[in-house]
């Protein structure tokens, strides 16, 4: 891996950490309140950004996992899936898995 590629990947990892922090804040809020449109839109944007940037820098597995999570969030937004405790647990597991994947780089 050349220096430029390493720099881009390190920048992505930093950006991903920020996005995952934002997501976690929303997940924690959702545990204790009814979701509103703004929260769900924020989650979707976070997932969408993470999916796109991870693919752009060569983190295909993160992009694929995030794609599935983005679809889940979309189904929540469209009231196809209710936001239950189990769904919130899945969202937390997603965050933890992406962090684990990033720690491996």
Image (tube, rainbow, N blue to C red):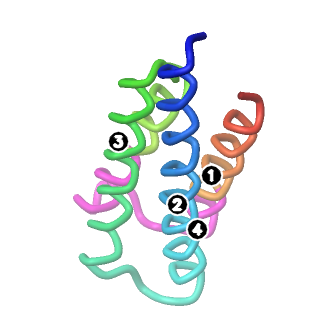
Per the image, the residue denoted by label 3 is 71
Residue 21: image x %, image y %? Answer: 57, 65
Question: What is the x, y in percent for residue 96?
Answer: 71, 50
Location of residue 104 (image quadrant) = top right
Dot 4 or dot 3, earlier in sequence: 4
| In the image, residue 82 above or below residue 67 | below
Element type at mark 4: helix
Q: Nearer the viewer, mark 1 or mark 3?
A: 1
The quarter holding residue 10 reads top right
- For the residue labelled by badge 3, is the local secondary structure a helix, a strand or a loop? helix
Point out the frontmost of discs 2 and 4. 2
State which region is magenta: 71-89
Other-residue count near label 2 (Cα within 10 Å), few / some / many at <14 / 14–19 / ≥20: few
Q: Residues within 10 Å of mark 4 (few under 14, many from 20)?
A: some
The dot on residue 18 is 2
Residue 105 relative to residue 52: left or right: right
Can you identify the residue that label 4 sits on?
A: 24
Q: Is residue 25 above or below residue 105?
A: below
């Amino acid at each position: 891996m050349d220096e430029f590629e390493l720099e881009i990947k390190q920048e992505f990892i930093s950006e991903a950490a920020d996005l995952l922090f934002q997501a976690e804040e929303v997940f924690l809020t959702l545990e204790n309140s009814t979701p509103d449109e703004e929260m769900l839109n924020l989650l979707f944007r976070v997932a969408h950004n993470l999916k796109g940037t991870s693919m752009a820098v060569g983190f295909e597995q993160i992009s694929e996992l995030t794609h599935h999570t983005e679809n889940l969030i979309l189904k929540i937004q469209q009231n196809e899936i209710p936001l239950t405790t189990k769904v919130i647990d899945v969202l937390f597991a997603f965050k933890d898995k992406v962090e684990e994947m990033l720690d491996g780089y």
